[in-house]
Image: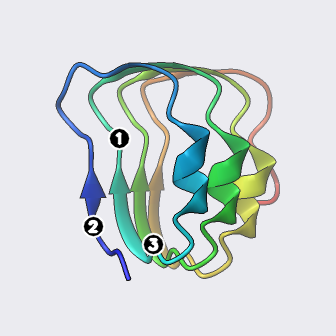
Amino acid sequence: MTSYMSFSFNSFTGRIPTELGNLGQMTSYMNFFSNTFTGRMPTELGNLDQMTSYMSFYSNSFTGRIPTELGNLDQMTSYMSFYSNRFTGRMPTEL
């Protein structure tokens, strides 16, 4: 079981790999903040249905809508952060 993955405070560019959505045993703390990730967030992150807390995407350059698939993370009980990006559209009601 994986419970901690942090990519914060680097200079990563491009998109978050969709393959991260295959980490089905990931339970908490997935951190992408303070990079220069761009493009849309992968909808595959909605497959991480064992996540219980802390997903952070702030301070990047994500565009488009926040994926409605993140609403599949019904075990999440605390902290999901999206601020300081370039998201557009409405906040998904699924969250």
C-alpha span from label 2 to label 3? 8 Å
SS under mark 1: loop
Q: How crowded is mark 2: few (under 14 residues within 10 Å), some or many (20 or more)?
A: few
- Residue occupying the point 40% across, 23% down: 60
Q: In this view, does 23 lie to the left or right of 9?
A: right
The residue located at (30%, 22%) in the rendering is 12
Name the residue beneath numbered marker 2.
Answer: 4
Identify the residue position indicated by label 1 in the image: 32
Other-residue count near label 3 (Cα within 10 Å), few / some / many at <14 / 14–19 / ≥20: many
Q: Mark 2 or mark 1: which comes first in sequence?
A: 2
Expressed as whole percent of the image width and height from the top left, the position of residue 44 reads 69, 50
Q: Earlier in the sequence, mark 1 or mark 3?
A: 3
Badge 3 amino acid: Met
Instruction: Give left or right: position of 58 versus 80.
Output: left
- Tell me whether circle 2 and circle 3 mark residues in contact (CB < 8 Å): no
Measuring from the top left, give residue 77's x and y in whole percent: 51, 79
Depth check, front residue: 68 or 89? 68
Q: Nearer the viewer, mark 1 or mark 3?
A: 3
Between 8 and 22, which is closer to the camera in this rendering?
22
Mark 3 falls on what kind of element? Answer: loop
As drawn, which residue projects farthest toward the left?
Answer: 9
Q: Residue 26 carries which label?
A: 3
Residue at coordinates 17% horizontally, 32% vertically from top-left?
9
Kind of element beneath mark 2? loop
The image position of residue 58, as x and y in percent, is 39, 35
Query: Dividing the image into 4 quarters, which one contains the N terminus?
Result: bottom left
Q: Which amino acid does label 1 sit on?
A: Phe
